[in-house]
């Protein structure tokens, strides 16, 4: 019976203090407290749920009296889009989270709360650190801005030991980012919008990506008019800009006004698209525009890849076959 009770207690403890088990985001933040002590922080965040919350692990590195200290605690990370268009990121320590001493001795530490906001127009990031010591909040310095992937990889050794499982996950995370930046990949986006007359349009966009630049794009648009399904295609120039919060702004511009009819006959003005995805390719927002109108974009969630692709391409088409790989 005692063994069963102990297992039950252990499980409840693990649920209460949930920490990041995978790496979806990393944040590097510095702050200086009122006594002048400088703190370096690394946050590892798991994937956000539909409620905007994710498990996170926070490690703090600092020096006092010529002794280096490294501590760890767990936090809930919240991702919020504000009414003014800005993005708010909050790291709130989980209730009664223990502070684990990784390195150092005679350490007494209150878990920190970090809240920062990303300006949608300027991409400027400002925020505060606070804890339970009744000290006034202090400004943070968000170090991700301007850091290369190589520099972020170097930071791993400051916060994690090679024998720790998280060290291996971090290496894989950053290795993948570097590999993706140095090879050509095909990227696929599926977007939808409503025209001014209420017609529903779907766009299937295929792009080639290398070294932070989109090379070429093929856009197919599918819609129904007068009871007939129509599909048109045109070539596009594609470009991206990596923002300071690691989100990516993507723009799709037609190369010419030439539009090919794939199914049905249509007189169609090629569309331009401008949209933003986060660091894990999740759609945030976007706009469609043509010669006559503009509309808000929505991201099409695909549950059956083969079924969706067959709306635009045949099974023998090379793009269809690559999409399913």
Image (cartoon, grey):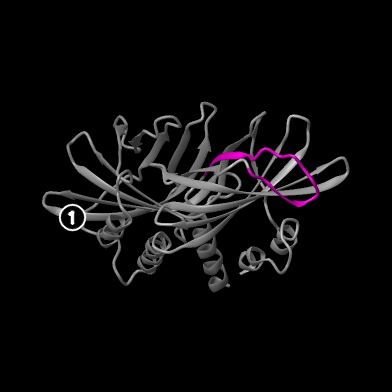
Q: Position of residue 166 (x, y in %)?
A: 38, 65
View extreme (left): residue:
66
Where does the magenta region start and end?
Answer: 258-276
Identify which residue is drawn at 82% across, 48% down. Answer: 229
- Mark 1, Cα crowd under 10 Å, few <14 / some 14-19 / many 20+, is few
| Count of numbered badges drawn on the protein | 1
Q: Position of residue 232 (x, y in %)?
A: 71, 48
Residue 171 versus residue 78: which sits nearer the camera?
171
Residue 84 vs 273, above or below: the answer is above
Identify which residue is drawn at 71% across, 69% down. Answer: 316
Residue 308 versus residue 258: which sits nearer the camera?
258
State the residue position of label 1: 68
Q: Position of residue 48 (x, y in %)?
A: 53, 50
Residue 19 appears in view:
no
- Considering the numbered disc 1 on the image, is that residue within a helix, a strand or a loop? strand
Judge from the rendering whether residue 81 lies leftward or rightward of residue 308; answer left or right. Answer: left
Q: Quadrant of the N terminus?
A: bottom right
Q: Position of residue 108 (x, y in %)?
A: 26, 49
Q: Quadrant of the C terminus?
A: bottom right
Judge from the rendering whether residue 229 lies leftward or rightward of residue 21; answer left or right. Answer: right
Residue 180 vs 283, above or below: the answer is below
Residue 123 appears in view:
yes
């Amino acid at each position: 019976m005692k063994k069963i009770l102990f297992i039950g207690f252990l499980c409840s403890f693990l649920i209460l203090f949930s920490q990041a088990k995978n790496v979806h985001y990393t944040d590097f933040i510095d702050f200086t407290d009122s006594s002048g002590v400088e703190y370096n922080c690394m946050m590892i965040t798991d994937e956000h749920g539909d409620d905007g919350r994710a498990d996170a692990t926070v490690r703090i590195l600092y020096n006092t009296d010529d002794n280096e200290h490294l501590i760890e605690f767990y936090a809930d990370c919240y991702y919020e889009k504000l009414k003014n268009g800005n993005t708010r990121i909050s790291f709130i320590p989980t209730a009664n989270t223990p502070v684990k001493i990784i390195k150092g001795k005679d350490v007494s530490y209150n878990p920190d709360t970090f809240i920062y906001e990303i300006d949608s127009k300027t991409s400027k990031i400002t925020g505060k650190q606070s804890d339970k010591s009744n000290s006034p909040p202090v400004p943070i310095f968000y170090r991700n801005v301007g850091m290369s992937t190589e520099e972020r990889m170097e930071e791993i050794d400051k916060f994690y030991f090679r024998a720790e499982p998280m060290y291996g996950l971090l290496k894989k995370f950053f290795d993948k980012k570097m590999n993706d930046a140095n090879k050509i990949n095909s990227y696929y986006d599926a977007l939808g919008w409503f025209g001014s007359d209420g017609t529903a349009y779907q766009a299937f966009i295929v792009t080639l990506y290398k070294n932070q630049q989109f090379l070429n794009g093929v856009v197919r648009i599918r819609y129904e008019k007068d009871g007939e399904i129509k599909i048109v295609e045109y070539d596009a120039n594609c470009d991206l800009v990596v923002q300071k919060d690691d989100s990516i702004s993507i723009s799709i511009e037609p190369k010419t006004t030439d539009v090919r009819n794939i199914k049905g006959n249509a007189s169609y003005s090629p569309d331009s698209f401008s949209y933003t995805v986060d660091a894990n390719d999740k759609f945030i927002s976007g706009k469609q525009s043509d010669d006559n109108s503009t509309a808000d974009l929505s991201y099409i969630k695909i549950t059956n890849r083969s079924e969706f692709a067959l709306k635009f391409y045949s099974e023998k088409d090379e793009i269809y076959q690559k999409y399913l790989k």
